[in-house]
């Protein structure tokens, strides 16, 4: 979110975020394992995207199971190498693409997926907006100061570990019906719900 969005986010109580440190080497293998299992369960297709809905949901569930979601963390996040090169919260603006809502941006691939999801939802009468997207390191520090760390009962990730710091997470601003739509369809676009207590927080895990 932009700095000017901080107050607004607090006002609608959609702060958060997930607190798991991201360990790239480990999470790559966990995700691969989950997807391998999901592929077997779905009848052998090699991609999640070709198995609309069901497989993505299975993969999401398995990812959670494999990586231990439940302690306030996100499980695994497959951080693209081009982002790892810069670091969490240090992503160059050129790698972040506007998503058509205020100043919000995501990593370009995630932004395109989000835009497609939002457009398809709109075509079905569902409005999807967001209250937060990419979050710089300084913004993560600010959020942690105001909302407290997850491990202490708050909502903020340890600065430098938030999925928002990779441009891979959005905090949705949707109606209950809208959230139901995203829960039914988000996986098709690579978005998964990852964090207990934060139904607004969705991460782009890609459609491999
Ligand atoms: Zn979030």
Image (cartoon, rainbow, N blue to C red):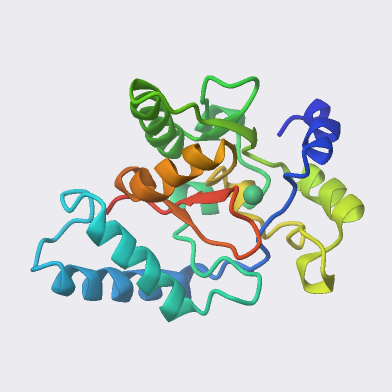
Kindly tell me whether residue 3 is visible in this rendering: yes
Q: Is residue 110 left or right of residue 84?
A: left
Residue 48 image-quadrant placement: bottom left
Q: Residue at x 63, y 39 (%)?
A: 134
Q: Is residue 5 left or right of residue 51?
A: right
Q: Quadrant of the N terminus?
A: top right
- Above or below, comparing residue 48 to residue 3 in the picture: below
The percent position of residue 197, horizontal first and vertical second, equals 66, 62
Q: Nearer the viewer, residue 83 or 52?
A: 52
Q: Is residue 62 left or right of residue 77?
A: left
- Above or below, comparing residue 66 to residue 28 in the picture: below
Q: Residue at x 15, y 74 (%)?
A: 40
Q: Residue at x 66, y 56 (%)?
A: 162
Q: Nearer the viewer, residue 82 or 119?
A: 119
- Total marks placed: 0
Residue 124 image-quadrant placement: top left
Q: Is residue 15 left or right of residue 59?
A: right
The percent position of residue 206, horizontal first and vertical second, equals 36, 50
Kindly tell me whether residue 86 is visible in this rendering: no
The percent position of residue 183, horizontal first and vertical second, equals 42, 50
Q: Residue at x 23, y 76 (%)?
A: 37
């Amino acid at each position: 979110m932009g700095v000017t969005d901080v107050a607004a986010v607090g006002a609608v109580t959609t702060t958060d975020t997930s607190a798991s440190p991201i360990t790239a080497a480990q999470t790559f293998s966990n995700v691969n394992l989950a997807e391998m299992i999901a592929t077997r369960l779905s009848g052998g297709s090699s991609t999640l995207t070709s198995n609309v809905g069901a497989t993505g949901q299975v993969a999401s569930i398995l990812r959670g199971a494999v990586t231990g979601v439940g302690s306030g963390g996100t499980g695994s996040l497959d951080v693209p190498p081009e982002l790892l090169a810069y670091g969490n919260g240090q992503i160059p603006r050129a790698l972040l693409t506007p998503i058509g809502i205020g100043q919000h941006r995501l990593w370009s691939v995630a932004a395109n997926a989000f835009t497609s999801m939002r457009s398809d939802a709109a075509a079905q009468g569902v409005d999807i907006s967001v209250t937060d997207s990419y979050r710089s390191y300084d913004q993560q520090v600010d959020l942690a100061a105001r909302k407290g760390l997850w491990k202490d009962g708050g909502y903020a990730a340890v600065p430098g570990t938030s999925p928002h710091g990779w441009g891979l997470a959005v905090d949705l601003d949707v109606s209950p019906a809208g959230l139901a739509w995203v829960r039914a369809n988000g996986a098709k676009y690579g978005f998964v719900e990852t964090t207990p207590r934060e139904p607004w927080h969705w991460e782009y895990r890609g459609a491999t």
